[in-house]
Amino acid sequence: MMIEVMIDSIRVSLTNQQRIVILKDVKREWYLPIWIGPFEAESITIGLQNIEISRPQTHDLMLSVIQSLGFQFSHIEIKFMQQDVFFADLVVKDAESGEERRIDCRPSDALALSARKKTRIFVSDEIMQQAGILPEENVHHETTDDDNEGLTFEPQDEERLSIFEDFLERLTDEEDTDDDDSDDSSSNN
């Protein structure tokens, strides 16, 4: 089963300056982060913001080639994940026969094309189950102050952290742990 998503945002990791494109399920609050390169992030941003450039970039050229060969860009499907690498298909249709063809590609390239043509994006349910992020429900906290004993409160929206800050924090912690492990192993040699 495929789930329709949209490009929600592009984020930059503060720890290593890598880019992450965030895809959002169009029907509910379910997010899929995908690490992408800086050039692909720039290309997606150009497509999303309809920025006019003086000369065609690689993704503009790809669209021109697809159209000049008599195909129409239909949609993209991010179909599976293997060893934390996502695999996608660019789906095109023959303008005359209507025959559908699938072209294997990186999700970042497919998203850059989709951003330009405003086409639909689909992700397999399996990937969303494996790598998707659901935001936590609002949590009520009990105060420990004697005067307010037993009272609960709900944090205001501006006080809540973004679900992605927690995600990035976990990644930073993992990187720090990996760095500590490599330092320990090198000192034992």
Image (spheres, rainbow, N blue to C red):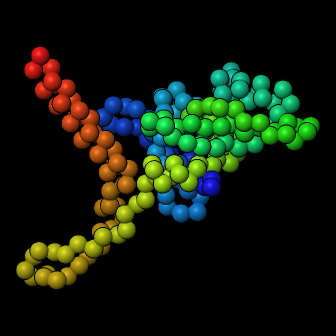
Q: Is residue 71 left or right of residue 83?
A: right
- Foreground pick, 167 / 129: 129
The quarter of the rendered structure image containing the C terminus is top left
Compared across the picture, whether 109 is left or right of 64 comes to: left
Q: Left or right: 142 with respect to 98? A: left
Can you give x and y, in whole percent of width and height, for residue 171 in the image?
31, 41
Instruction: Tell me the quadrant of the picture where the N terminus can be found.
Output: bottom right
The total of numbered circles placed on residues is: 0
Residue 119 position by quadrant: top right
Residue at figure coordinates x 65%, y 37% from the top left: 89
Picture residue at 68% right of the left edge, 48% below the top: 120
- Quick check: 147 above or below 69? below
Give the percent coordinates (x, y) of residue 87.
57, 36
> In the current view of this chain or complex, which residue is farthest to the right?
96
Q: Residue furthest left?
A: 146
Q: Residue visible at 56% across and 54% down? A: 125
Query: Closer to the camera, 87 or 20?
Result: 87
Residue 48 visible within the image: no
Q: Nearer the viewer, residue 127 or 96?
A: 127
Please provide percent x and percent y for residue 81: 51, 40
Q: In this rendered view, identify the residue nearer to me: 151 or 24.
A: 24
Residue at x-position 21% and y-position 29%? 179
Q: Would you say residue 98 is visible in this rendering?
A: yes
Determine which quarter of the picture holds residue 113: top right
Q: Position of residue 92 (x, y in %)?
A: 77, 37
Going by the image, does 141 lie left or right of 189? Answer: right
